[in-house]
Image (cartoon, rainbow, N blue to C red):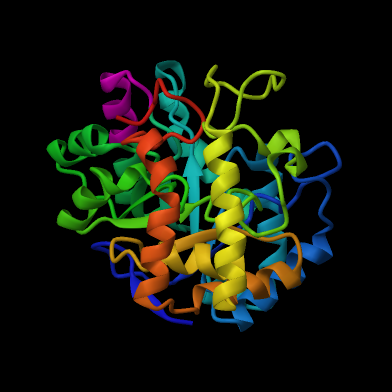
């Protein structure tokens, strides 16, 4: 698999990142149970297929995802892996524990260092954001992490980072064919400042994979984003009517384009993301090796320009409604 330089760092990462949120999950978790052997098999096959970049977070399954990933990194696999982890933005009273929280994460992962550590989500308190960025830089200076970055940061928030003189190598954010707000300001900014971009939710948790024929077929816990009507779904935060008519039209057109072109819906949607020069890697989670192999195939697919143009066109009505908003879940965005 093709490797690219992650932003201004010296890390060469695969164009697909394996999302490890499902690792360590049980029957009460968002994704349902996943056994340790399944996680280990996924990890081994991903490496065999050329994936070397792996994403997790302190919060995934309350730390169990990190523990399961650490347990799966046996037989010398750690040396073949670049691990990206995400720490929540801590409140003022917890800032003195920042280094210890990173060390606790290292213990769960059974490693001496993180390759990349990101602030998971920012908040609107600029002083608190600066204080967290200072702590993030300190753990890098101590050698606990090789590179630092951010997740879900807008241009204003990245400007604070730049004004502090802190170098970040990556911004991890939601970007896909029906969530294109990053194109208006964030991607031009990251391109200008040599900041890599990890695109998460490439298939909208399966919605763009071709498995659903209609909005009604999509499980309620997948219908939580700006695209869906909040009426009758208490899992939705945005409080609006969504854009379900436009989404239904898009899904119908996507299936038609898949049938016409011979590419699967997943191939179309994932390859479309990587056609943007600003995107370093697509972050895709998998429950099975079949899903992993399909995602790898999609990442390695190069679409002709006319198909990219058609995907641009059929997604344009949704892009127009979303505008510059880069937060998948609400309009009063934490991303600014």
Q: Residue at x 35, y 31 (%)?
A: 335
Tell me residue 275's x, y (percent).
Answer: 36, 68
Using the image, determine if residue 104 lies above or below residue 267: above
Dominant secondary structure (helix, strand or loop) of the stretch shown in magenta: helix
Q: Quadrant of the C terminus?
A: top left
Q: Where, by quadrant of the figure, is residue 267 drawn? A: bottom right
Q: Residue at x 33, y 38 (%)?
A: 153
Q: Which residues are magenta?
A: 123-134
* Whether residue 111 can be seen here: no
State how many labels appear: 0
Using the image, determine if residue 76 lies above or below residue 11: below
Q: Residue at x 59, y 31 (%)?
A: 228
Tell me residue 87's x, y (percent).
Answer: 48, 39
Q: Nearest the camera: 224 or 69?
A: 224
Q: Nearest the camera: 322 or 79?
A: 322
Tell me residue 223's x, y (percent).
Answer: 65, 35
Q: Nearest the camera: 130 or 263?
A: 263
Q: Is 139 positioned to the left or the right of 9 in the image?
A: right
Q: Is 258 positioned to the left or the right of 217 in the image?
A: left
Q: Nearest the camera: 178 or 194?
A: 178
* Whether residue 154 can be seen here: yes
Question: Does the magenta run of residues contain 131?
Answer: yes
Question: Does the magenta run of residues contain 250?
Answer: no
């Amino acid at each position: 698999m093709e490797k690219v330089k992650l932003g201004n760092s010296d890390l060469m990462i695969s164009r697909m990142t394996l999302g490890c949120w499902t690792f360590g999950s049980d029957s009460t978790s968002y994704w349902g149970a996943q056994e340790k052997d399944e996680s280990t098999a996924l990890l081994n096959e991903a490496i065999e297929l050329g994936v070397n970049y792996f994403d997790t977070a302190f919060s995934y399954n309350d730390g169990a995802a990190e523990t399961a990933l650490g347990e799966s990194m046996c037989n010398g696999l750690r040396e073949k892996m670049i691990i990206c982890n995400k720490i929540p933005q801590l409140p003022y009273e917890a800032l003195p524990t920042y280094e210890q929280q990173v060390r606790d994460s290292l213990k769960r992962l059974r490693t001496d260092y993180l390759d990349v550590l990101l602030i998971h989500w920012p908040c609107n308190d600029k002083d608190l954001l600066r204080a967290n960025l200072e702590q993030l830089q300190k753990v890098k200076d101590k050698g606990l992490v090789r590179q630092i970055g951010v997740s879900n940061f807008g241009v204003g928030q990245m400007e604070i980072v730049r004004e502090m003189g802190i170098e970040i190598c990556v911004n991890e954010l939601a970007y896909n064919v029906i969530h294109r707000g990053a194109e208006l300001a964030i991607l031009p900014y990251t391109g200008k400042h040599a900041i890599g971009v990890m695109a998460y939710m490439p298939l909208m948790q399966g919605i763009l994979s071709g498995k659903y024929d209609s909005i009604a077929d999509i499980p309620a816990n997948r219908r939580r984003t700006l695209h869906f009507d909040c009426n009758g779904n208490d899992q939705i935060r945005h409080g609006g009517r969504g854009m379900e008519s436009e989404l239904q039209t898009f899904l119908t057109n996507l299936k038609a384009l898949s049938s016409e072109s011979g590419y699967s819906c997943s191939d179309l949607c994932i390859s479309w993301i990587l056609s943007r020069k600003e995107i370093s890697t697509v972050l895709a989670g998998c429950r099975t090796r079949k899903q992993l192999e399909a995602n790898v195939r999609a990442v390695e697919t190069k679409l002709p320009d006319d198909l990219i143009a058609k995907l641009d066109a059929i997604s344009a009505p949704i892009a127009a409604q979303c505008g510059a908003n880069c937060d998948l879940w609400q309009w009063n965005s934490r991303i600014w």
